[in-house]
Image (spheres, rainbow, N blue to C red):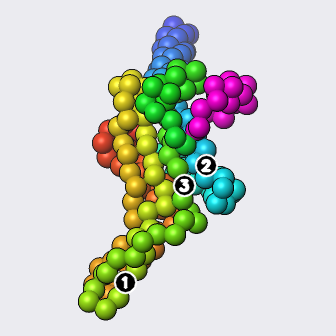
Amino acid sequence: MKELLKTGLILFAFIVSGCGSANETTDKTVTSTTKRVAIMPFENLAAYPYGGDRVRDAFIRAFLSRNVEIEERQDKWEKILKLDFSLWNINPDQAKEIAKLLDVDFVVYGRSDLNQLFPKRMIGYYTEREVIKPVEVKVYEASDSSVVLQERKDLYSSWGLVTTIKSIDQLATDIVQTLVDRGYISNN
């Protein structure tokens, strides 16, 4: 009876220790595939000083909803500011330098024209409306060393007589969803 009890305890200890190591391996796998993103300010300070912050915050929320890490360490950002780049008007070479400096997978940048006057276009025989494409977004991927997404979307969408207006949050969510659909970010 004692032998059977010892064997059962040894078998139980072996199973419990095996489950613990499997969980550690799974956790390491998950953290190694977690993407890291740096989201640059969407500056257009001459028109509206907080417009860029609103766009950047929308992208931070959209990426966090997909469990993507956002690089926001102050010491790293100080190094970027010393580079003296116009952060909304960077080119792919500058994005590559920023991605290397921050050790991120993606650099999201662009510009915001939230208060700019837009030209009008006809949407029917008798009505016209403004063409509003206030946010230009570019996503640079460090592993490809290239811009993998560049969007400037209209916030208005019309179907028949029904017109809907997207929020900046919805625009950011759509951009992140496009990255998911294209396989750059896992679908969590």
Work out whether mark 1 precedes mark 3 in sequence or the reverse, and give the earlier one.
3
Question: Mark 1 highlights which residue?
Answer: 128
Rounded to the nearest angstrom, the CA distance separating label 2 from label 1 is 29 Å
Q: Residues within 10 Å of mark 2 (few under 14, many from 20)?
A: many
Label 3 SS: strand
Q: Amino acid at mark 1?
A: Glu
Work out whether mark 2 precedes mark 1 in sequence or the reverse, and give the earlier one.
2
Q: Residue furthest top?
A: 3
Give the side of residue 39 with respect to residue 48, left or right.
left
Above or below, 166 relative to 88:
below
Give yes or no for contact between labels 3 and 2 (Cβ–Cβ under 8 Å). yes
Question: Mark 3 highlights which residue?
Answer: 112
> Start and end of the magenta stretch?
71-87
Residue 46 locus on image (x, y percent): 66, 55
Give yes or no for contact between labels 2 and 1 (Cβ–Cβ under 8 Å). no
Label 1 SS: strand
Label ID, residue 43: 2
Residue 79: in magenta span: yes
Q: Amino acid at mark 3?
A: Ser
